[in-house]
Amino acid sequence: MRCAGPRRTTSCIAERLFRPLTIAVVCAALLAGCASRPTEYARRDLTADQQRHVAAQPAVLQPHYRNVFAEGRRNEVLNLMELGLTAFRNGHYDHAERAFDSAIADIESVYADNEAARRARSLWHQEDEKDFKGEPYERAMVFLYRGLLFLRAGDYDNARASFLSGLLQDAFAEEEQHAADFAAFMYLAGWAAMKMGSERLAEEHFEEFRQFRPDAPLPEPDHNVLVFVETGKSPRKLGDGMGHHQLVYRRGRDFEDVRARFDYAGEEYEAYPVEDIFFQASTRGGRAVDRIIDGQVEFKSRTESVGTNLTNVTNNNVVAGLTAGTGAFAAVSVVGVSALALSARANPRADIRYWETLPDTVHVYSLRAEEGERELRIEYLDEQGRVLPALTHHAEIRFDQRGNGIVHASAR
């Protein structure tokens, strides 16, 4: 099936996949019955053709392309996540789009909202020798960045579809489903709907958003620039308990930046901390996770809340029944998923692989800017409100053909 016309949906993403790196999928399915090859998960030497392919890529991306080849199917999704985000942050947008599209195809083969995917998930446990598909917050963030790339291209309907698909991934966790509470997606879906010219949809998304962030500033009708800023470092996954068969989450470490502000037209604005990624990693539908064992969540029996970096947000633990009944979620094939899941050897150790380049917190703001204005000065602050000069930089406003812009900035 070909994807025709400008109004493509995420169900068409797979047509544009970056697939020279994934021939190993066929081999993995054929070898499903082989369970005792110690070199199956080792790094492979690159062929001459693969080495030439890596050498032809931008220098900052070469280590990630090398990892995709060397680590094969088992770490493919993880390496595509890392590749896509590095490419996005460094302005290699075509590489970022292809990497995230490929990751999405793999993710949706197991975490789509259909019966075939549910059967595949019943075979899938987070053991450290299985093919990496990511935790709910990691899978959701793939869709977030893909949606930002759609926004950058002025493709608002696909952007909105991607953000809503990210909400769906937030609801899928281990063998259970939980309420989606990833407020950033509601805000971004509302922004995309505004740019599509759908006031009704925008109002619905922002109303849902308000249930989680009642004090957040909402975009004004004439705002045409979205500012999206990342601070801090990724949540960490650790093995715990006897034999390290339990999975626990810890906040990222070795960073000071927790807030962000920027100057525009002589005025200073502080970006709103819309999402604490550690909070999303360590909760399910707002409920604090104690640990995960054999793919099953154990929730905290105590009443203390999970720490969050969001400031002055009163309802960040409120769980609202979110219904994204827009039909925007993609459906993809799950052919071969069961075989791939069965091919991995059972191992009780927890899967502690994680997306290391994610931020700790994401911040948003919107404003009205003229197309002649091309950059913002971004400052990062610590917990005491002190500016961290080494992180200050200028971020470009990327205007699309409709006169709307996006700023993506990262302290990293």
Image: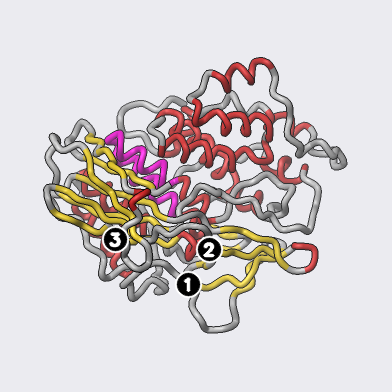
Marks 2 & 1, CB-CB < 8 Å contact: yes
Residue at image coords 52%, 27%: 18
Residue at image coords 50%, 26%: 59
Specify the segment rendered in magenta: 143-167
Q: Image quadrant of residue 89?
A: top left
User: Residue beneath label 2, please?
Assistant: 251
SS under mark 2: loop
SS under mark 3: strand
Report the disc number at residue 307.
Answer: 1
Q: Is residue 327 visible to us here?
A: no
Number of numbered tags placed on the structure image: 3
Q: Position of residue 22 (x, y in %)?
A: 62, 29
Q: Amino acid at mark 3?
A: Tyr
Tell which circle, 2 or 1, labels the residue nearer the N-terminal end: 2
Q: Position of residue 154 (x, y in %)?
A: 27, 36
User: Residue beneath label 3, please?
Assistant: 272
